[in-house]
Image (tube, rainbow, N blue to C red):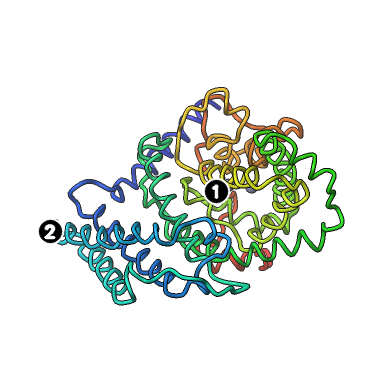
Amino acid sequence: MAEQDSQDYEYREREIEDMSDQAFRFGEGRISGYSAAALGILSFFAVLCYQFPAWLTTADLRAVYDGEVLQKVLMVAMWGSLGFALLTFVLGKQRKLGAIGVLFTVAGFACGGYTVPVGEVEHQPLSLGLDWLILTLLMSVVLFTFLEKIVPKYREQAILRPEWQLDLFYFCFNHLLISVLLLVGNYFVATVFGWAISAQLQGFVQSLPTVVQVIVLIFCADFVLYWSHRFFHEKPALWKIHAVHHSVEHMDWLAGSRNHVVQMFVDRCLAMVPLYLIGADKQALDAYVIFAGIQAVLVHANVGIPFGPLKYIIATPQYHHWHHSSEKPAIDTNYAVHMPFYDYVFGTYHMPKEHWPAHYGTTKRLPRTFLGQLLYPFRPEKD
Ligand SMILES: [Zn+2]
Ligand SMILES: [Zn+2]
């Protein structure tokens, strides 16, 4: 078994070495080229958000950020894109990426640039979460790419690893849906669980210190998430939906974005049930949402931070990487989202000491396109 494990590791190391031609190295124009293109594209869409906020931005999120402060960020991004494009042209490589950056940035300037006045926004019941997409993408790229570079688990894995475009598409698609997800989730909890609201319970919860409220939220939410996740694994029809998430074969911060749209709606509705019933105060709820959001990305990341004894208390990358392993006995283990606690209780905990999986993905390979994966759960089995 030990020999098999070491062979698996060697295989994986070789597979990762094949990615080395995708790596970013200084002086090759790829870093500046991709930076120019990414900043240009994001800036262009950010300008559109300022031009059409009612249709392209999220009401809940608008309340949190300062549009005028973000215009300064936009200014830096637009000039940054042009600067990186210039560097790309000077280096004489990856000129196409530099040109994409210039094209989008110039289009952004033509649409009003970073000086579009920020005013009152007309309310729309539904809008695209383009602001949510741009802000989370920018923050995730900066934070998690940095972490994956300074404390990587698989050092040779390229940032642009296989299928990154597919997962980026999932990231964009699922983030744009935010206001539809929130609307459906709110409607679901209010109509199905409205009767279960207890003012007494909510009053008691709100009388607790904020830290305790957050812990209560984590325990209650994780119970619901553990069982819904387990059902998605154990019921064959549900598994075909959830298999899309497990079809990722290279783990990094972007990998967690791969979720079937049905899964997105079911997860959102179910995750809101405990939050709705517990009725914690806003501070505790905000803290929980931030914790859950960061953890959901971190557990997929190619990050080998040594968590020490903390790894037995909270869900870490190592813990969730085992959940994505395609090898027995890791299959169908580690269902919890926030803490391994319910896996201990219900007998599904799996975490070999200091050891990480050699392979990720599903035992049966899924289609490798967004559309193929969208239709996969609804197509009859071929064999
Ligand atoms: Zn799963
Ligand atoms: Zn996952």
Callout 2 secondary element? helix
Q: CA distance from mark 1 to mark 2?
A: 41 Å
Which residue is most to the right? 195
Relative image position of residue 379 (x, y in whole percent): 66, 68
Based on the displayed image, in which of its 4 quarters is residue 137 positioned?
Answer: bottom left
Based on the displayed image, in which of its 4 quarters is residue 216 positioned?
Answer: top right
Few, some or many residues within 10 Å of mark 2 (<14, 14–19, 20+)? few
Q: Is residue 212 left or right of residue 161?
A: right
Callout 1 secondary element? loop
Looking at the image, residue 273 lies above or below residue 325: below
- Residue assigned mark 1: 361
Task: Give the mark, 1 or 2, whose residue is nearer the N terminus.
Answer: 2
Position of the N terminus, as image quadrant, is top right
Few, some or many residues within 10 Å of mark 1 (<14, 14–19, 20+)? many
Which residue is most to the bottom? 110
User: Which amino acid type corresponds to the residue marked 1 in the rendered image?
Assistant: Gly
User: Which amino acid type corresponds to the residue marked 2 in the rendered image?
Assistant: Val
Looking at the image, residue 3 lies above or below residue 241: above
- Residue assigned mark 2: 90
